[in-house]
Structure formats: C-alpha cells, structure tokens
Amino acid sequence: MKRRLFLRILGLSSLFYRWSLQDLAAADRPLVAVADGKGYAQVTRNAIAALGGMKRFVKPGDVVVVKPNIGWDRSPEQAANTHPLVVRAIAEEALRAGAKKVKVFDRSCNDERRCYANSGIIDGLAGLKGLELKHIEPERFKKAHLSGTGKEWELYGEAMSADVFINVPIAKHHELTGLTLAIKNMMGIMGGNRGGIHGNIENILADVNTLRRSNLVVIDATRILVAHGPQGGAPEDVRVLNKVIASTDIVAADAYATTLFGLKPEAITTTVAAYKRGLGEINLNKITIVKA
Amino acid sequence: MKQIRAARLSQLLFLLIFVALFIQTEYRGSDEISLAVNSFLRADPLVLTTYVLATRTFTLLLLPALLVLAFTLLLGRFFCGWLCPLGTILDLITARIKKTAPRQFLKGNFKYWLLLPLLAAALFNMNLAGLLDPISILIRVFTFFLYPLFGNAVRQGWIGLYRLLGDNRDFLEPGYGLLRDYLLPFRETFYPLAFLSALVFLGIVFLERYERRNWCRNLCPLGTLLGIAGSFSLFKRLPARLCPDCGACAALCPTSFDREILNEAECIRCLACRRGCSRELVAFPFAPSANLDQTHLPERRLLLGGLVSGFFLSGLFRFRFPGENERLLRPPGVTEEKEFLQKCVRCGECMKVCLKNALYPAVHQAGLEGIYTPVVIPRLGYCEYNCTLCGQVCPTSAIPSLPVREKKRAVIGKAVFDKNHCLPYARKTNCIVCEEHCPIPQKAIRSEATEERDSSGKKFVLKKPYVVNELCTGCGICEHVCPLEGKAGVEVFVVKDRTPLAEPGPSPSPQ
C-alpha cells in the first residue's frame, strides 16, 4: 500500500469514527422535538411522537397532572395562557395511553373563574372522560422543604402525588426573569405569597423543580408574547410561530425556546440556575434538536 | 288540609325569587348577569321617590317602581301583602313569637317622622333611603351576614372532611360540586358592619313580640309611602269598620284592624279578612269616590316638621375627616362623589357580586352620610380588568353599567409608590410584582433597569418601578399583590379628575 493511500484511508476512517462517536453520544444527549404547523392539536401530537409517544410516559392506571399556564384573564389570541388546543391534545394522548385520570389546574393570578373561562380551557377540555379541570383548593397545599434555599414552602398536593407530571407552559416575555417557560411555569403549584420570592426567584424555582420533576415538558410556542409579559394584552406584542416544543429535559426545552426570542439560553437566570442544579442541559451544542 | 291563600302563595313565590336572584347575583361563568336581586329594588317606590328627589331626574331602570306606584294608587298597598320578602319573612315567623301589648309610642305619626325627613333630606341632596329601605335592609343582612356565614360553615366542613379523609374526599366531590356551583358564594368574605346589619334585621324581628307586622305598619318608610299612595286606592274595603256583632276581622288582619275603623293606609290587601268572614260580607269593590275624606294624610305641621328635620339631617350627616377621603375609592365608573351618594341605595349588591371582593361597605370612611356605601379596599381585593358586574347589578346606576371597553378605561384612582416601603427602592431588592400584574396592555407600571451595588459592594441590575399616570386606572391590583407584609409599597389614592383614560391606540413599543 502506498503511504498516501494509507493516510487517505486513515483520514477518511477517522471521519467515520468521529461520526459514530457522535451517534453513540447522541443516545445520552437530551432530545428536543420541535413541531411546526397550523393544526395545533396535530402539531402537539407530532412533537410528543418524536420523543417516542405518550405511552413512553404514561402507563395504564396512572394519575396524570397536566399543568398549563392559566394565569391570566386573557383570551388565547393574547398569548398569556397556554393554548387550549395544545392542552387538549396532551390530555387526549394521556387518556389514550391509559391514564386513570388527567388533572388540569393552575394557581392563577387573576380571578380563577375568569381565567379558566377566558383562556378557553373550559370549552377546550369539554367532554373528555376522565379529565378533571378544577380550581386550586387551598387545603391541598402541603409544606415542603426547599433544599437549595433552605426555605419551607407550600406545594400543591395533587401535583406532588401525581404519577406523571406534564409541564405545559406558553413561551412568553416576563419583565423580571426575561422569559417565562417551563421552569417558571412551576410557580403555578406554589402556595403562599409567591410575590415574595421575586428577589430570589431562580433558586427557589430550581428547588421546586427538584422536588417535582416534570416527566414531560411541552412548550406552547404556537404564538408567543414578546413584550409586556407575563400578561400582555396588546395584539402587537404577539408573534404567531406555530411551533410546539417537547422534551423530557426541562432545561433543554427552555434553552431551545429561548432562541425563539432571539436570546441566548444563558441570558435567562431561571434556566441557568436550574442547569447549575443539574436539572438538565443548557448548552445548545449538546442538545439534539429533532424537527417533527 | 289548610288551604293556602293566594296572597300567601304570591308571598312565598316572591321570597323564593328573592333568594334565587340573590344567589344568582354572582359571577357564575358568564360575563353578564341578566337577572339579579336588584329587580326588587328597581321595583321599590321608596328608591324611586328619593332618587327623583335627590337627582331631579328619572332613570328607566326604575320604571318597575313607577309601575308599582301606579298599581298602588289603583289597588292599595298590595306590595306589602303580596311581594315584600321582608314582610313575608315576618309573616312566616310571627306565629312563633309570643305577643305582649303594642307599644304606644310607635303609633300615630311616628312612621311619618321617619319617612318625611328621609324624603326631605333627599330633596336637600342627601339620599339616606337605603338605611331604612326594607329591601336594602334584607339584602344587606343576606350579603354581609347570612351568606358569608353559610358559605364559611359549609366550606370549613368541606375542608374538615379533607383533614379527615385526605384525597379520598374526592368521592364526595360531585355532591359538593353541585352545592359549590349553584348555591355557595365563591369566596367566603367577611364584611365590616355585618354585626350592625344583623342587628337591624333582628331588631325588626324582635319588634314582632309587640304586635304583628310591627315594623311594616309603624316604621317601614316604604310601607308608609305606599300607604299614602294606597289611601287613594280605587278599591275600598267594605264594610269600612268592624261589624258590631262579630269583629273577627280584628284577629284576622295582620295590620290595620286594631281599631274600629279600617285604616286604609295600613291595609296591605292580603284579603285574609275576606277569606275569614263567615258571612261573606267582606268585599273590595271598585269605588273611586267612596270616603276619600277618610284617607289619612299627614297634616301640615308634620309636613313642615319633616321638611325642617330633613334639612337638618342633610347637614348633620355631612361631616367627613379629610384623611379618610384620600382613600375613599369608589367603584369603577363613578366620577362624582356627590352624584354617587344621591343614587346609592346601600344595598350591598355590588359588594356581593364583586369578583375579587374589592368592595366593602364604608364604616367611617365616608362619614355618617356614606355609611354602607361601597368602597374599594385594594389590599383586600382589586378591581378585575375585564369585569363589569358591579355596574350591571346596581339598581340605580349609581355605579354606571359600562361596556367592557369603557370599563377598562374608567378611573378609580391613581397608584402612588412609597419609596420608603417599595422593595427595590427601600431594600434594593428586585421585585416588580406590581408591573407584572398591571393589566393595562401598555403597562401603567413600568420599570427602569439601573446598575446598583448591593451591601457587599457587588454590582447588579435593579429594576425600579414607576407609574405612568395617564395609563393608570387605579384598579388596585398593584397594591393588592405587593408582597410586602402590612403596608404596601404602592397604593391607590383618590383623584378628583376621574375622566376615563384615552381610547388606546396602537402603542409605540417602548424598547
């Protein structure tokens, strides 16, 4: 064999070798599925299917909590709450996978009756058997110890005891934390004076996310709010993206969603704090993004 | 079996309607409440009369009251015997209350001394009718006392069950769900003046131990007013006096046969005497000209006295402490305090219906003149941006019924930061919960990022909130959610100029 040929083969094979290494590593790399399209129910299904389908997460007989954002007395077009079609698709998938019960709730900021009505969630989930859409009942909060910050905080019992927790935020601007995504969506299971944590919000949210891991994260970016969040209200602050993002890695999901706003994941303190706590991967280069 | 009289049937029906409408006067999923308990006040001639005297205008809202007045002129004081829910409640319990002798000082002109000053005060711009109006009294005791108590008892029981059963309580959920959705108040709010409201009602019940319908015949200003109108009734009861050989009517009549001659002003047309007459002598024939001379009208001395005392009343009640005024926040859409007081009947419906329980009866904030009138207390509840319910249920449009678009621009007051308390200013701590909650799409509370040093000298970015006055409606959500314990770092204060905000145009993005 000529030396040149040998080198050539060596060089080429090393190329192959690198690829195969990458493939091997990919098994451990967090996967973020991004689905595009106008039929939001189907887009949501596609995103979940790209992760292996709902059966991967929900076993027959499970009690499933689907936690959307229903925080504000705003309509779906105003992009302050999770789109009801996204929530419905997830609930349907979970029920089809054999869930005994699917519970949907949020501790809203405006009057909960108006939020549930105006967000479209009541109409959106109507007629699903095995589905429970309820307001928060204060007696169900249970004291929990937040290990990172050393605080005691009340967390919602039904969220903590669920077999499967599906975190379904809407991606939107937030004046204090920059954006509010899946990690911050967990504020909806917190009791007490939530406003009081705003000085140390990222660490407390990392704590809460440690205590209640999300088995599946589905971020609704069908339309996003780019300013005046988290409540919005003006149509000029809304962008329609027709995207739904799904992942089992909450940090990776948030990191990817951040790019939709033209921001770097590291700019969002809640994502950084969760990453440092080992809740997931923030580095986009170490995340596999799958178009679904 | 005892046969039920038509009047009693009507009474029970209207009491039922009253209770049903009362429960219905709450947000139950729809932005509009088509029928509320305000219907009773809208059919209340006392409300009508004082409204017209105080404002010198008429409102179509009170058309039913005009009809009731017209029918009273025609038929007599039927309202008290057929419709009034307070009268019905008294009729239902009076049999269980042992009677002593009637109190003489309540007799004679006493009731006119209540009604006439009330009307005269209204003429001098002070409408106090709500204090003594029976429908207002009844709605108040329901709103401030009975309903919260009922709601709280059921709810505490339900929570107690959770302590006992834990998540197994879910099996009982369907039953409780029905109760919660159709019967219970959404929140158990306790109100100031609950005690006074209950006391007034219990006082009225207590009076029953002296004689039947004691309140109705001797005190009630609505009844008195209807009595005056009813004296002109075209139908007169015959015979006009007790029959010398029988006199059974005296026992049958709930109101006016405690003397020889029937007092037409007190006859509530319940027809108990006609049913009870063994000889079927009693009739209420059409007799337009009959014994008009018998109609008892207050004499001149009384009229004059009423006018003078009403004038005094309108001055005596007016004092207010200036410090209280600055926080005397009225419901959305109210722009003139004076006009508001002329119209408000203090029924408490706005407070009952208020989504976030922002409204409470004024105790001392508005002076004696304003007792029971609604005040926004933002620390307890805020005005929900998209909600228009208080205006919808107000029987006299003291709180105007505004479409959502306009309501969103209605000014209650303006928010003011207190930098000695507000976290970013006072403690260099990031917060801006107020800005987050501000419902105005362009944000009436904004923040500017500044670079600061913390206590250890490290640089960090601090967001300092400020108010954009032209956009602030004073809804109070900022004050409500301010995470400080005790006094909030941002508070809403009254402003004189409550012109609605300008119509929102497409906003320049503030980036």
Image (cartoon, rainbow, N blue to C red):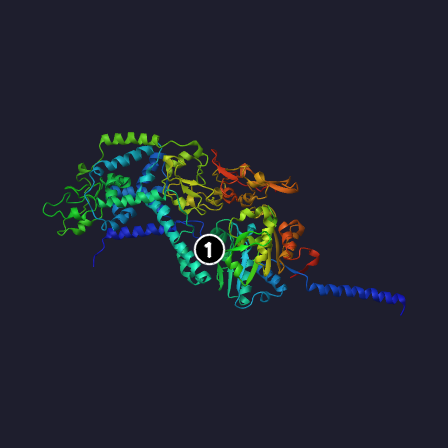
Does the rendering let one see residue B42? Answer: no
Horizontal and vertical percent for residue B152?
Answer: 39, 52
Q: Which residue is mark 1?
A: A139
Horizontal and vertical percent for residue B146?
Answer: 35, 49
Horizontal and vertical percent for residue A101?
Answer: 50, 64
Callout 1: SS: helix
Q: Choose top left, top right, bottom left or bottom right for residue A210.
A: bottom right
Q: Quadrant of the N terminus of chain A?
A: bottom right
- Mark 1 is surrounded, within 10 Å at the Cα level, by few (under 14), some (14 to 19) or many (20 or more) other residues, namely some
Horizontal and vertical percent for residue B361?
Answer: 39, 41
Q: Which residue is the extreme one toward the bottom?
A: A1
Does the rendering let one see residue B287? Answer: yes
Q: Residue at x 26, y 53 (%)?
A: B9
Q: Which residue is the extreme one toward the right?
A: A2
Q: What amino acid does circle 1 point to?
A: Glu
The image shows residue B237, relative to residue A28, as above or below, that is: above
Q: Is residue B185 left or right of residue B92?
A: right
Q: Choose top left, top right, bottom left or bottom right for residue A252.
A: bottom right
Q: Quadrant of the C terminus of chain A?
A: bottom right
A280 and B332: which one is in front? A280
- Give the number of marks: 1
Q: Choose top left, top right, bottom left or bottom right for residue B102.
A: top left
Q: Is residue A6 left or right of residue B365?
A: right
* Subunit of label 1: A
